């Protein structure tokens, strides 16, 4: 009996050992000096198959870099051409950063997805150990990033519009990220197009219109009934075999000139035509009902009048019974010659 209990305890420990080890790794926070080309180590200690690595910065928790053995790598805009996955071992998810600034100070979270043991995580704190930056006590908002558009589009309000991103760079494209930055808002992903195992995969996250992908990975956004809140910048990030390329489009939604809108004008025409048709149909029905009532009223009056009633009764009697009359006939006189014998 004791041997059976001992085996059960061993089995429970083997099941929860990976989770216990992962939880210990999450509590450890390594400190790394802020410097050019700094390395954030994220090497999984056990053997297995690495399926994906993702890096996020706390507390934003926005994805900054993702690695997939088959689909490749993907970087967010602030870390383009700044992050490199080292891949020194098959289970290594470490990265190096270049062009570092004091904005890179903070805590980073690494998550390594493995098979068959599951996820393994690690937290790293980046600090400036040499000289801390001067504190900025000003209440002014931080300067915004200046966005330069490659193409400018102007659309009239309440019309339809298509925003297209064409790939005008050399190289083979394997992924396109479609982003949108409206006035006073940060960049947000509205669509992703990529090639997976020779096929085209499209992901649409837009709440305004629909994102369309072509076989050449040219992306377009179809907007219906354009409004003022659609004004802003639209950016396409092309991940190619020669690097990352971008195309930015600025959309400006203008109010109708002189307050005239073709869409509203046509809508008013349709509403007026529908109302006129309904009024005409109602008039026809009313006239038909009045004519029918008038005819019934005339028939009813004819039936109630005494003379008309007697004439109608006589007519019915004449039709149902034959009429007899006594007619006087005159005899023809005989010829005298024939009467004397």
Image: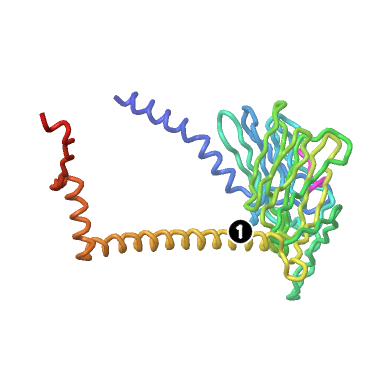
Percent x, y of residue 319:
20, 46
Report the colour scheme: rainbow
* Magenta stretch in the rendered image: 79-85
**Residue drawn at (82%, 58%), measured in percent from left and top?**
147
Could you classify mark 1 by the number of other residues whose Cα lies within 10 Å: few (under 14), some (14-19), or many (20 or more)?
few
Percent x, y of residue 308:
23, 62
- Asked if residue 146 lies in the magenta stretch, the reply is no
In which quadrant of the rendered image does the N terminus lie? top left
Pick whichever, 179 or 18, lies toward us.
179
83 vs 173: above or below:
below
- The reply, left or right, for residue 92 in relation to residue 279 is right
Percent x, y of residue 183:
73, 63
**Residue drawn at (73%, 41%), measured in percent from left and top?**
74
Question: Label 1, on which residue?
Answer: 270
Percent x, y of residue 280:
51, 61
Pick whichever, 161 or 181, lies toward us.
161
**Residue drawn at (72%, 44%), measured in percent from left and top?**
65
Pick whichever, 24 or 170, lies toward us.
170
Quarter of the figure with residue 271:
bottom right
Quarter of the figure with residue 127:
bottom right
Quarter of the figure with residue 192:
top right
Whether residue 138 is visible: yes
Secondary structure, mark 1, is helix
Whether residue 124 is visible: no
In which quadrant of the rendered image does the C terminus lie? top left
From this viewpoint, which residue is outermost toward the left? 341
């Amino acid at each position: 009996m004791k041997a059976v209990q001992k085996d059960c305890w061993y089995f429970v420990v083997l099941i929860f050992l990976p989770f216990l080890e992962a939880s210990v790794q999450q509590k450890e926070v390594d400190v790394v000096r802020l410097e050019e080309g700094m390395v954030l180590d994220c090497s999984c200690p056990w053997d297995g198959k690495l399926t994906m690595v993702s890096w996020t910065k706390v507390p934003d928790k926005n994805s900054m870099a993702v690695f997939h053995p088959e689909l490749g790598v993907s970087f967010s805009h602030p870390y383009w051409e700044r992050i490199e996955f080292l891949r020194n071992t098959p289970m290594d998810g470490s990265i190096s950063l270049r062009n570092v600034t004091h904005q890179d100070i903070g805590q980073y979270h690494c998550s390594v997805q493995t098979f068959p043991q599951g996820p393994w995580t690690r937290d790293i704190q980046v600090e400036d150990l040499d000289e801390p930056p001067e504190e900025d006590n000003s209440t002014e908002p931080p300067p915004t990033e200046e966005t330069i558009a490659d193409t400018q589009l102007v659309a009239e309000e309440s019309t339809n519009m298509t925003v297209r991103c064409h790939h005008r760079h050399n190289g083979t494209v394997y992924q396109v990220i479609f982003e949108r930055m409206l006035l006073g808002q940060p960049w947000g992903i509205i669509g992703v197009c990529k090639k997976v195992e020779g096929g085209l995969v499209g992901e649409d996250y837009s709440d305004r219109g629909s994102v369309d992908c072509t076989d050449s990975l040219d992306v377009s956004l179809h907007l219906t009934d354009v409004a003022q809140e659609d004004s802003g910048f639209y950016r396409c990030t092309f991940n190619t075999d020669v690097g990352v390329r971008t195309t930015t489009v600025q959309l400006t939604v203008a109010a109708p000139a002189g307050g005239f809108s073709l869409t509203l004008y046509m809508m008013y025409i349709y509403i007026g035509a529908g109302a006129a048709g309904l009024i005409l149909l109602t008039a026809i029905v009313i006239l038909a009902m009045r004519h029918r009532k008038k005819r019934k009223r005339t028939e009813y009056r004819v039936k109630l009048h005494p003379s008309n009633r007697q004439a109608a009764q006589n007519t019915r009697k004449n039709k149902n019974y034959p009429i007899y009359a006594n007619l006087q006939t005159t005899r023809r006189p005989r010829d005298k010659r024939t009467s004397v014998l």
